[in-house]
Image (cartoon, rainbow, N blue to C red):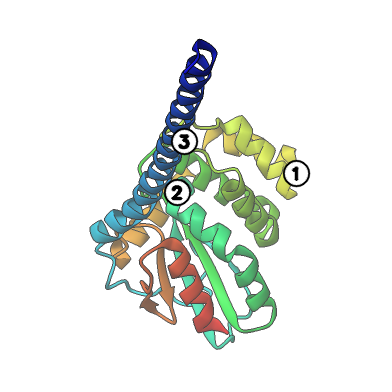
Amino acid sequence: MSKQSARETRAERAAAALEVQRRQERRRATLMIGGVVLVILAIVVGGFLINRARDTSTDVAAPAAGSGDYGVAIGDKSAPHTVVIYEDFLCPYCGELEKATHSELATLADEGKVYVEYRPFNLLQTDYSANAAAAFKVVLDASGPDVAKKFHDLLYENQPEEAGPYPDTGWLVDKAVEAGAEEGQVSDDITQGTGKAWVEDASAAASDAGVRGTPTILLDGKVFQDGRTVDDLANNLLAQLQ
């Protein structure tokens, strides 16, 4: 074999070895990415299941339909189904449930198939949970249930991470105005936390009813827990209301 042929053979072997190495590296990268995705999915699903396991809200006393003391409702009280959702504005699973059911529940309520009551309270015992729920009460009193429901929806659309940082009361005022509240009617009360006494009462009422976790869903007066994930829970709930 000539020197030139030997050099070409060595070059070909090196190129082949390099290609094998590159394929192995791509395969490792793909496996690593897939592993990370699976870990994230396991954390999300596992977190919900752990939260569900800790939740002992299996025997909750249903509030009187349409009582309106601690929440806001959509739909007709005479609808064939009633859904009550106990929630904390910071609870990430409440946020996921809201995303999965918001439009569908509104449509079903408009069609007269369900009466839905959202009952926020301070389960997580954070400043944001208390401030957001208190602001909700201020908006409800000052601007009525339609604006309060829009404010409720905006809080979930812009929900902060559970670990923080949390928006301040000025941000809550801005969201209230975005929902349709008059700034002059809500700004001072939201900033001063006027609604916090109501939040304490709402939280006590939820606790007295037997609520120990969020979201806690009552379907026609009974706790609804049909689902291993939030999406399963949402889909199964909606299926019951068709």
List the residue tagged with mark 3.
Answer: 23
Q: Residue furthest top?
A: 3
Local SS, label 1: loop
Where does the image place residue 64, in percent across and percent down from the top left? 45, 76
**Viewer-nearest of discs 2 and 3:** 3
Where does the image place residue 142, in percent across and percent down from the top left? 67, 51
Which one is nearer the viewer's eye here, 134 or 87? 87
Where does the image place residue 175, in percent across and percent down from the top left? 67, 41
Which one is nearer the viewer's eye here, 67 or 40? 40
**Quadrant in the rendering for residue 229:** bottom left
Q: Residue furthest front?
A: 1
Amino acid at circle 2? Pro
Local SS, label 3: helix
Query: Height in image: 165 above or below 104?
Result: above
Amino acid at circle 1? Glu
Q: Label 3: few (<14), some or many (≥20) within 10 Å?
A: few
Query: Height in image: 163 above or below 10?
Result: below
**Viewer-nearest of discs 1 and 3:** 3
List the residue tagged with mark 2.
Answer: 92
Residue 36 in sight from this viewpoint = yes
List the residue tagged with mark 1.
Answer: 182
Q: From mark 2 to mark 3, how far is it between C-alphas?
A: 40 Å
Q: Earlier in the sequence, mark 1 or mark 3?
A: 3
Which one is nearer the viewer's eye here, 90 or 40? 40
Mark 1–mark 3 contact, CB under 8 Å? no
Disc on res. 108: none
